[in-house]
Structures are given as structure tokens and as C-alpha cells.
Amino acid sequence: MIDKDTEEALLALRSYLDQFGFTRFSKYIVSVKLYGLNPSMIGLGTRDSVADFSSYLTGEYSAIGLAACLMIGIPVDYAGLTGLEQRVADRLIAVGLLKREGGLLFMGPYQLISVAGMPLLEDARVNFPSSSNHEVYFGPDSLLLAYYVDTASIQRTDPVLDLGTGSGLVGLYLSYFSDRVTVTDIAPAPLRLVHLNRVLNRRTETVEIRTERYEDTLAQGKRYKAVTFNPPFVALPQELQAPIYAKGPGLDGQDYCRMLISRLDDILAPGGTAYIVSDLPGSVKEPFFVADLQRYAASQKRSIEVYIDSRSDYIAGSQMFGPLGEYLQRENPSLTKEECTARIEQLHRKTLGADCTHLSVMVVRTAGELPSGVRVFNRYRTLPLGGFEVPLKGSPS
Ligand SMILES: C[S@@+](CC[C@H](N)C(=O)[O-])C[C@H]1O[C@@H](n2cnc3c(N)ncnc32)[C@H](O)[C@@H]1O
């Protein structure tokens, strides 16, 4: 999937990143306040405010210029780089991972970020929007999925699976805990990216990449201790075209979630756990999908936890479907942005009758000694903004 020159360029990049402490540098730039929420929050709109780099790119501070260019997208003067940086930059330019125009270097097709200590390349258009939509997805749901995995329950010899891996973020994260990771995808852009990220993270021995449809992975009869799944889950009108990572099948977009949950016995090892992330339409009380989960829990004797981590309310007149409409208009050139927005809004508010979406991680296991059923941990049940009510001092108990 990737050639020798690209592999060598990535290994040279990794060795340079390790030498100057890229992960620490990245955390510093994003800041402790935001890193936990979204380590890749540097984009076109924020790169000038994250920190002032000009004074750090020369003299005794130099050696971070190449990383800053790859990460923040600021053009960097080739002549001002250290010898090591120039050698790495030359290799990256030769394989198309960095651009050179005259004496200046520019970010190539990928942005370099750091997640959980791993350097990762992501489709640069996620954070640096251009005239075309990004081809590989990465977002808060990817981070949330990794966050909720009970990593302490995974042994190094346990086989684990990340279905539809995209950039490979979750699968590579799992490789910190298991030496037998399988990741799958079917689209060329994510498959190329996960190959790049696997080399950048020196995981070619422990992470297997398979070009395989979800359905075929489920049919293979191989079982895993942990399965992570970040499927396309956005509920979108049938007639609208959308990128492969976004539109979920079924009226409410959740049919891939249903597919995995109903077939867990085909893929989970005894004592195994499935982690599924989705943005679930619902009422402010709870996601509509909880009713489906209750049926699965009862008929298959499952213990299911739903962690609702954030909620987006469909506030009347707020134009909240506007950005999605604009993004989908690029895929549906015969429609206007307003038409796309109106169709999405109609589906969510009228057809589904939803008031909001709940970004949730569903954790599904065989009940065993646990009671079978669904436990919804919804931080919005206590206070509208998701906080917890602190009991007043002296209040009667
Ligand atoms: C929401 S993205 C996952 C993003 C990933 N968690 C990350 O952080 O990069 C869903 C991925 O599933 C892949 N996909 C969609 N349909 C698929 C199918 N039927 N079989 C396998 N992969 C599929 C897409 O190509 C996409 O990369």
C-alpha cells in the first residue's frame, strides 16, 4: 500500500519527532485546557491564536520549524531549518507529504497531530477546510471511543478489532495494550492513511490492516476480546449523497450499530466487550435508540451501558443544520446549501421527531453475572448543561 521511499520518509520523520519531543510540544501548543477535549484543535481559525511561534523558530529554539509547519500549517523557511530537518523535509517532499514552493515549505495533504502520545497524520482538510470535503474522517467521536475503552482489561495477547478504522486512531491506540490488533476499512483514502500512521507509529508487526467490509469481517468467525466501532452514523435523507464515513444506513442512520449489536456472538470472544460510538437522535430525555438497546438486552441477555457525553440541542431558528447543509452541498451540486439544510432539518425534526442528538458510547457485553438490561449514564439528566448538582451545605438530608 505504501512504497519504500514513503516508509523511509515516515521513519525519518518519526525519529526527528522523537528527538525533539513532539508529543510534549503538541500538548503545550494545544494547552492542557483543550488537549483532553480535542488534541487536534489547531485549524485555520485557531492556528494564529494557539501560540505565537515566530520567536520559537530561530536561534537556540530552532528544530521545531518542520513540526510546526506540519502541525499548524504555517509556511516555514527551508533555509532556516536545521540540517536534520532539511534532510527529513527533503524525503517528505519527494513522496508528496510536504510541499515546497521556492524557499518555503507548506503543509501537504496531511496534518500532523498528537493523540494519547501517538503522532498521527490526519486529512488536513478536517481542520484546514478547502473547496473539497475531507476524505478521511477524524473527530470528537473518534476520541470518545478510544477514551471509553477499558484498556486495563486487555492483555497483550488478546486479539482486538477496530472496525472501519479511518485514520487508524483507535486501532493504533489499542496497540498500546495488545500486540494482536486488526483494523479494517474499505475506502482507499483511509486505507492509505492508516498504512502511513502504522509506519509512523512503528506498528507494522502488531497491527494488521485488512481491506474488508464490516459484513465480511462479521462473517469470518474470528472472535475478539474488544471490538471498537465508529461507523458512519449521521441520519441523512436517502436522496442526498454523502462521504462514506458520514451517512449511516437506515432512516435514523443507526443500522450499522444494529448490525453489530445483533451479531455480537459472531465476533466477541467470551468475556469480550464491544464499544460503539454514535451520535444518537432523540428527545432531551434520552436517545430513541435506547428502546432498540432494551430489546437487544432482553432478547440476547446483554449488559449495555450508554455513556452520553455531550448533547446538541436543535434550538429553533439556530441554523444548527447550516454547516452540515453547506458541507453536503459540495457532494450534491444540483441542490443549494439552503435546500440541503432544509432536507436534513426536515428529517431530524419532523420525520424522526428528534429534539437533539446525544453523542454516546455504547458498551455491550454478555450479561454473565451482571443484570441484563440497559443503564444510561446521562450527565444531562441531572442538569441541562451536563454538570452535576452539588448538594447545598446544611440542606436537610
Ligand atoms: C466515522 S469513520 C471512522 C473514523 C475513525 N474512528 C478515525 O478516527 O479515523 C468510518 C469509517 O468506516 C469506513 N466504512 C464505511 N463503510 C464501511 C463498510 N461497509 N465496511 C468497512 N468500512 C467501512 C469508512 O471508510 C470510514 O473510514
Image (cartoon, rainbow, N blue to C red):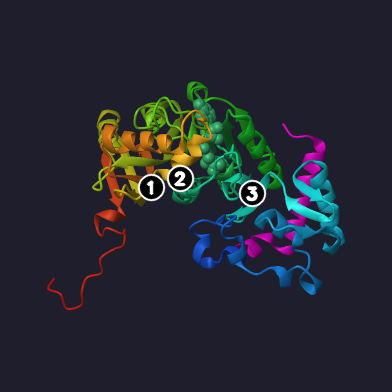
The amino acid beneath tag 1 is Met
Q: Pick whichever of labels 1 and 3 is earlier in the sequence.
A: 3
Circle 3 is placed at which residue position?
Answer: 120
Dot 3 and dot 2 residues touching (CB under 8 Å): no
Among the 4 quarters of the image, the one containing residue 26: bottom right
Front label number (1 vs 3): 1
Q: Quadrant of the N terminus?
A: top right
Q: Which residue is mark 2?
A: 323
Q: Amino acid at mark 2?
A: Pro
Residue at horizontal 67 percent and vertical 46 percent from the top: 110
Which residue is found at the position 37% from the left and 33% from the top? 343
What type of secondary structure mainly makes up the magenta span? helix
Magenta span covers which residues? 1-27
Q: Estimate the x, y position of residue 117 in percent, counting from the top left.
A: 61, 56
**CB atoms of marks 1 and 3 within 8 Å:** no
Above or below, 78 relative to 196:
below
10 Å neighbourhood of mark 1: few (<14), some, or many (≥20)?
some
Question: x%, y% of residue 394?
Answer: 17, 78
The crowd level at tag 3 (other Cα within 10 Å; few <14, some 14-19, many 20+) is many
Residue at x 39% of width, y 43% of height: 321
Whether the magenta-drawn stretch holds residue 197 is answered as no
